[in-house]
Image (tube, rainbow, N blue to C red):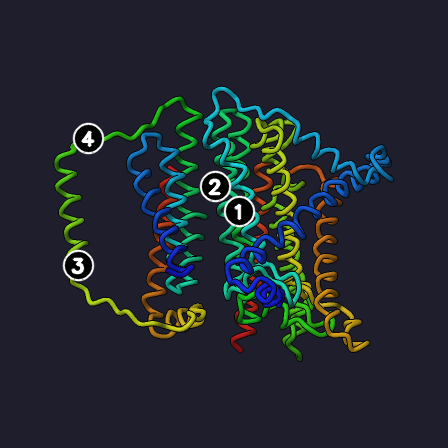
Amino acid sequence: MIYDFFFKLTNSNFLADLIQSLLPLFIFILPFALFAVLFERKVSAHMQDRLGPMRVGYHGILQTVADILKLVQKEDIIPTLADKPLFNIAPVLVFAGSYLAFAAIPFSSAFIGSNIDLGIIFIIAASGFVVAGILMAGWSSNNKYSLLGAMRSAAQIISYEIPTVLVVLSVIMITGTTNLLTLSEMQTGHFWNWMIFGGPVMGIAKFIFIPIMIINFVIIYISTLAEVNRTPFDIPEAESELVSGYHTEYSGMKFAMFFLSEYANMFAVSAIVAALFLGGYQSPIGYLGNLFGVHWLIPIEQFFWFTAKGIFFVFVQMWLRWTLPRLRVDQLMALCWKYLIPIAFVNLLIIGLITVL
Amino acid sequence: MNIYDIIFYLFAAITILSAFFVVTTRNIVYSAYYLLFTFFGVAGIYVLLGADFIAIVQLIVYVGGILILLLFGVMLTNKITNVEIRSGSIQIVPAAVGVALFAGIVMASMLNTKWKNIETAMPSATTQGIGLLLIQQYAVVFELLGILLLVALIGAASMARK
C-alpha cells in the first residue's frame, strides 16, 4: 500500500494521512480536468466536422492551461443582491462533495484513499453534499434561472439515485460486500469474471446473471449520467432555457470550481460503474508484471487499466452529449419512474431469488 | 491528547456551534444550512465511536434526504413567492422553563449513568453484524418499520393528489 510508503517516509501518521488524502486531487483530478476539458472540446469538434482549439500548442493541447490563466485573472463578481456568505461557500461545498467520493474509489490494489468497509454506500452518501451545494448556489445567486436550474438538478439527482441504489444493491447481493477494494479483488482473473458477465460465479447461475447484469449496467450508466447532469439529462443547465443553470452568476475561479467538480464527478461516476461492473482496476487479459515476474509493475498496470476504463466511460458521456437531444422534464421523470425503477426492481428480485437458492 | 481527541473536539465543536446557530439565526435558509453541519458533525462522532454504518446512514437519510427536502420546501416558498419566512422567538418564559427542565434531566441522567470505559482495539466493520441482527433477531420489527414507512409514503402521495 502507498500509505505504508508515506508512513516510512515521514514517520508520522498525520503527515501520511494528509499526503494520502491530497494525492487523488493533485495526482489525478487536476490533470484529469485539464485533459478532459480539452478532450471534450476536441470530441465535440470532431463530431461536428470541425477541428476544435488549434492555436495554443500543438493541436491546442495547452488550451485549457490558457483558459485557467484567463479565469485566474478574471474579476470575482458577486451580484449585489446575492446572499454573499452562501454564494461564496457553495462552490467549495459542491467540490468538497464530489471530492469526498474519491476517498473510497480504488485506483489500484495499492491505492485507495480510505479502505472503508462501506465504500460504495459512502459514495452514495457523499452525493448529498453535492445536492446541498447546488441548491445553495442556486438560491444564493438570487436569480430565477439559477434557482430553477438548482431545483431541477436536485430533483433529478434525487430521483435517479433510486435506480442507482437498486442496481448497487443487486451487485451487493451477488458479491456480499460493500467494500470497493474487495469487490474489485473478487473480479480478478480474466474479463469473464467481471460483474457485467455475471461475476466470479460459475455454472448455470452465471448464464442467468449475464443478461440481467448487462441490463443493470445500462440502467446504472443512464442514471449516473443523470446524476452528473450530462446530456441527454442536462435540463438543469439547459443553455437555451436557463442560461447555464445554477452557476449562471458565477465567474472567475468560483466558476472554475464548479467546472472542476463537474469533471471530477464525471470521472467519479465512470469509475464507480467500472469498479462495480467492469472489474475495477483488474486487467482483462492478465498482467505484464506476472508474465515477467516484476511484481511492483502490477499496481501501476492496475492504475492504467482503471483510468483507461474510467476515461472510456467519460468518452461515452461526451459522445452521448454530442449525439442526443435533451429530454423534457416529464420525459426525464417518466424514464426514471416508469422504466428504470421497475426494471431495476425486477432484476433485484430475480437476483435475490437466485442468490438465495 | 492524541489525534483522535483533537478530531473529536473538532467534530463536537462543529456540532454544537452549528446547532446553536440553527436555533438562533433568523434567516430560515441559513438555519437549514447550519443543520447540514450539525448532521455532518454527528456523523463524524459516530465514526469516532466505531459505528461506521450508522454514520453513513446518518449522512444518507439526514443530509441526502431530509435536509434536501427541507431546503426544497424553504426555497420554493422563500424566493419564488415573495413571502419572507423568518424565525423569531415567542413565549420565552415557558420555553426557558421547558428547556431548563429538559437540560436538567439530560444532565442528571448523564452524571448518574455508569459509562462503560473500556480501551478497545481498532473498531471493526459493523455492517454485517447489523444486517444479521435485523434479518434474524429483529426481523418482525424491521418489517413493521418498513410497512410504517410505506404507509407514510402512500399517505403523503394520496394527500398530495387532493
- Report the chain holding disc 2: A
> Mark 4 highlights which residue?
B90
**Quarter of the image containing the N terminus of chain B?**
bottom left
Gap between marks 2 and 3, in whole Å? 36 Å
Label disc, if present, on residue A97 of the rendered structure: 1
* Label 4 vs label 1, nearer the camera: 1
Around disc 3, counting alpha carbons within 10 Å, would you say few (fewer than 14), some (14 to 19), or many (20 or more)?
few
Q: Residue at x 63, y 47 (%)?
A: A264
* Secondary structure beneath label 3: helix
Q: Chain of mark 3?
A: B
* Quadrant position of the C terminus of chain B in the picture: top left
Q: Is any part of residue A155 visible from this angle?
A: no
What is the CA distance from the residue labelled 1 to the residue labelled 3?
37 Å
- For label 3, the residue is B109
Mark 4 residue element: loop
The quarter holding residue A302 reads bottom right
At mark 2, the secondary structure is helix
Q: Is residue A56 left or right of residue A355?
A: right
Residue A251, quarter of the rendered image:
top right
Q: What is the chain identity of the residue bearing mark 1?
A: A
Residue B66 vs residue A72, the one in the foreground: A72
For the residues bearing labels 4 and 3, Cβ distance under 8 angstroms:
no
Mark 1 surroundings: few (<14), some (14-19) or many (≥20) residues within 10 A? many
Tag 3 or tag 4, which sits nearer the N-term?
4
